[in-house]
């Protein structure tokens, strides 16, 4: 029986008041869990409850020993003037630039202020995927991505090591169905 | 006469105090700018000035008052769930009115208040020099450890929490460095010149070069060069140091506009707009032909 990386047991999560739950699932290495649901259903809140940014009102979250997590945020804010290079952003998560797809390579040598919103979204997503984290949380990673970028992301998800797992939030049902090994429809 | 003043031993301690502060404040300003918290520097420097003058009213050492006031604000800042420009705006107004009102309670109070707001570099002594040296040593010592943590928190806000890594140590060290910079800067060169040194060098340095380490070096170089130019100009022209420093720093802003202009010229070279224009029918046909 495979080791469980993460288990949510009837978790009710939110901020000042509960937003979502009770939610229950467990995640084993090699799994890609898709979270679907309407706007405001609480999909991002589930991710934030796992990282400790949202408050847990009821239930428990059990992590495997030494679980490492990378979290790609929805709508990451692109600082207007910061001359940080793409490669330096990769290094923050210990991500391996050589494992990144070809579409990313030119971005690694560019300063962030030259990025478009879509390029920045792609760079952040790839930094999380190429990091050594055992669990990758992706919040609407397909937002603002063009066809080539979507293909590159699909390829990376397909190549993901079997020792790792992903929780993928997306409104794009076709993308979820293509990549996920299990699905959870979230409702408030 | 002014040329002789420049090399007068009396000015050595103020000169080196300011130079060390220029390097430290530029670096800490770069971290504040990276976090989009540069306005906090002005709010804190004004509050430090209130604390300094309040200590004067209570016959306590000025440094203790400045540290206590800035420290209290940083504790309050950590306790609030969200802090933004409105809070920093209130701090600036509170600092300005508090400094001048408290100044009216003591003899020569308006002079002390003006010194704290505008600067008093020529009256600094070895205590200030030592404070500036300690600040720079701590800034340089902690920078390689602090900088990646602050950058990670900027781009991946929950990375440390998600991986159960401690957040308090780096937040505490950064808060102490900011307080140290603001207080030492305010009591040595004044609240507004200290803010100018925290704000302008990274504002200019960040657009001059590419890469994080180079940005830090460029910011520090701009800060130190502006300081040296201002120190010489203030003595040679017999002008007050604080306003001269601020004016020289603002002049450095032209470097930013020149760089921005060069980049814009580079980016718009070659008109691509017409080359890719196709009526929708031809566009669809081209799409079908594409491999």
Image: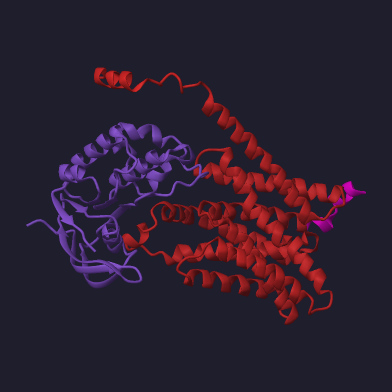
Chain colours: A purple, B red
Q: Residue at x 43, y 18 (%)?
A: B275
Residue B11 in picture, x, y percent from top left: 81, 56
Viewer-proximal residue, B117 or B227?
A: B117
Residue B94 in picture, x, y percent from top left: 66, 70
Residue B232 in picture, x, y percent from top left: 80, 47
Q: Which residue in the rendered view is the most extreme toward the bottom?
A: B58
Residue B4 colored magenta?
yes
Q: Which residue in the rendered view is the most extreme toward the left?
A: A1
Which quadrant of the figure contains the C terminus of chain A?
bottom left
Q: Establish if B48 lies above or below A169.
A: below
Q: Establish if A64 lies above or below B211.
A: below
Q: Establish if A181 lies above or below B56.
A: above
Viewer-proximal residue, A170 or B258?
A: A170
- Residue A160 visible in image: no
Residue B219 colored magenta?
no
Q: Which residue is drawn at 53% across and 27% down?
A: B268
- Magenta range: B1-13
**What secondary structure predominates along the stretch shown in magenta?**
helix
A176 on left or right of B94 = left
A161 on left or right of B171 = left
Q: Establish if B109 lies above or below A134.
A: below
Quadrant for residue A175, please give it.
Answer: top left
Residue A67 in picture, x, y percent from top left: 24, 58
């Amino acid at each position: 029986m495979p080791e469980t990386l993460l288990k949510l047991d009837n978790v009710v999560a939110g901020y000042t008041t509960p937003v979502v739950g009770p939610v229950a699932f467990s995640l084993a290495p090699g799994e890609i869990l898709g979270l679907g649901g309407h706007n405001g259903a609480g999909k991002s809140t589930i991710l934030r409850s796992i990282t400790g940014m949202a408050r847990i009102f009821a239930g428990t979250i059990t992590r495997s020993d030494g679980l490492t997590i990378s979290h790609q945020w929805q709508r990451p804010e692109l600082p207007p003037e910061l001359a940080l290079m793409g490669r330096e952003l990769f290094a923050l998560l210990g991500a391996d630039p050589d494992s990144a797809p070809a579409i990313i390579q030119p971005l690694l040598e560019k300063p962030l202020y030259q990025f478009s919103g879509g390029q920045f979204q792609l760079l952040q997503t790839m930094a999380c995927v190429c990091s050594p984290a055992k669990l990758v949380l992706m919040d609407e990673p397909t937002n603002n991505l063009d066809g080539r970028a979507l293909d590159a992301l699909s390829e990376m998800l397909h190549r993901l090591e079997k020792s790792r797992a992903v929780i993928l939030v997306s409104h794009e049902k076709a993308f979820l169905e293509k990549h996920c090994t299990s699905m959870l429809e979230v409702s408030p | 006469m002014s040329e002789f003043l420049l090399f007068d031993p009396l000015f050595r301690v103020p000169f080196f105090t300011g130079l060390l502060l220029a390097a430290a404040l530029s670096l800490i300003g770069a971290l504040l700018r990276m976090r989009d918290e540069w306005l906090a520097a002005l709010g804190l420097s004004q509050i430090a000035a209130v604390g300094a003058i309040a200590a004067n009213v209570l016959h306590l050492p000025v440094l203790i008052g400045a540290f206590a006031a800035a420290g209290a604000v940083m504790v309050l800042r950590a306790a609030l769930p969200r802090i933004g420009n409105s809070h920093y705006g209130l701090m600036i107004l509170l600092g300005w009115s508090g400094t001048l009102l408290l100044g009216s309670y003591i003899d020569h109070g308006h002079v002390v208040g003006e010194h704290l707001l505008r600067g008093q570099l020529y009256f600094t002594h070895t205590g200030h020099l030592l404070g500036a040296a300690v600040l720079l040593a701590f800034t340089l010592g902690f920078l390689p450890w602090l900088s990646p943590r602050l950058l990670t928190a900027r781009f991946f806000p929950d990375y440390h929490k998600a991986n159960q890594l401690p957040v308090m140590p780096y937040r505490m060290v950064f808060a102490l460095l900011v307080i140290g910079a603001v207080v030492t800067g305010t009591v040595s060169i004044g609240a507004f010149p200290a803010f100018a040194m925290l704000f302008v060098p990274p504002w200019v340095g960040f657009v001059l070069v590419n890469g994080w380490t180079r940005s830090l070096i460029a910011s520090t170089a701009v800060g130190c060069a502006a300081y040296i130019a201002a120190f010489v100009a203030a003595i040679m022209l017999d002008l007050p140091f604080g306003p001269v420093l601020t004016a020289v720093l603002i002049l450095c802003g032209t470097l930013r506009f020149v760089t921005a202009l060069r980049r814009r010229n580079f980016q718009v070279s070659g008109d691509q707009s017409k080359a890719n224009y196709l009526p929708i029918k031809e566009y669809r046909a081209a799409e079908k032909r594409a491999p």
